[in-house]
Amino acid sequence: MPTRPTFSVLVVVLLLCSTATADQFGRFIYAGETHYGKVSGSQIHVLQDNLFTDSTKTFTNTTQTDLSVPINQVQWLPPTDAKKVFAVGMNFASHRSSRASAPPPLFLKLPSSLAAHNANINLPKDSKNVHFEGELVLVIGKQAKAVSIEDAPNYIFGATIGNDLTERSWQRKDLQWLRAKASDGFGPVGPLISTDIDYNNVVLTTRLNGKVVQQENTRNMIHSPAKVVSYLSQYFTLEPGDLIFMGTPGKTKALKNGDVVSVSIEGIGTLSNTVLRGE
């Protein structure tokens, strides 16, 4: 008769599984200077240079300096200096669905719309109906042009967290979604990029003032990361550091002055911002 594993063996196996983590990188200000760093526990080991060094041959320059800084003493920045910020709409049936057989519905957010973790978001004075949209965000790692769906994952460096803030009234009445989606501060993102996580199968949770308001697994995305990257690369040259917001699940609601929106993704962390309304 086969023997059952002992309780202690099971505990060891569970601990080994729970401690396996992906590499995490961030971009931040420390002592008045901007750095990229690799996170290790409560410390960030400062990298020698920009995270992305060669757009066609290699993902990253992870050479570390002798400097490490406490993670609680940095001012976070958006995790890359993105030149292009794409976004996918209608990518979860629980929010609003598109046809899986069709191209992914796409729009642009401006790099100037990006905001860092813990930054206050000052909404335009005439905005009346700004909603949260917690999202997985892909980070491009090397130059991609006309790549296949099968090869597309090789161009994804990792994933971070985003909040695609949207002014619903403007979205309905403007010719383009530019004002509704890309006003200053309408793209909180970060703070960390995680590599080697299965971004096709992680749970995304959005909390409004501590209460869960969105929660869904990314396996329910209608258009996969590989499909989206491949499709975009047919028309745009994707560069290291470019970001792709992958769509939001569930229902959203209008934000009030002082609301705190926190978006968490397992294996990555939490992005949190306070919304302030202009008077």
Image (cartoon, rainbow, N blue to C red):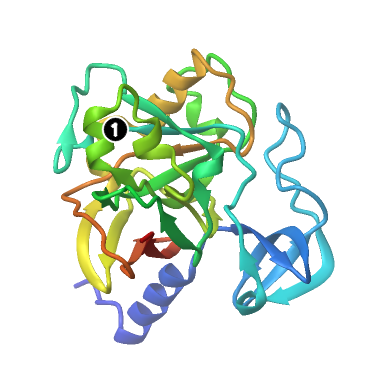
- Find numbered disc 1 in the image and state the secondary structure of the residue it sits on: loop
Residues 254 and 98: in front is: 254
Residues 245 and 38: in front is: 245
Residues 234 and 109: in front is: 109
Q: Is residue 152 above or below residue 13?
A: above
Residue 159, x across and y down, in percent:
48, 47
Whether residue 258 is visible, yes or no, is yes
Residues 276 and 259: in front is: 276
Question: Which residue lies at the image location 37% right of the left edge and 38% below the top edge?
Answer: 181
Left or right of 89: which side holds 151?
right
Q: Quadrant of residue 167?
A: top left
Q: Quadrant of residue 245?
A: top left
Give the position of the N terminus as an image quadrant. Answer: bottom left
Question: Which residue lies at the image location 38% right of the left edge and 64% below the top edge?
Answer: 276
Q: Is residue 273 above or below residue 200?
A: below
Left or right of 204: which side holds 195?
right
Residue 74, x across and y down, in percent:
66, 71
- Report which residue position mark 1 lands on: 89
Left or right of 206: which side holds 31?
right
Question: Which residue lies at the image location 74% right of the left edge and 59% below the top edge?
Answer: 35
- Residue most toward the right? 66
Question: Which residue lies at the image location 53% right of the left edge and 14% below the top edge?
Answer: 146
Give the position of the C terminus as an image quadrant. Answer: bottom left
Tell me the amino acid under the disc marked 1. Gly
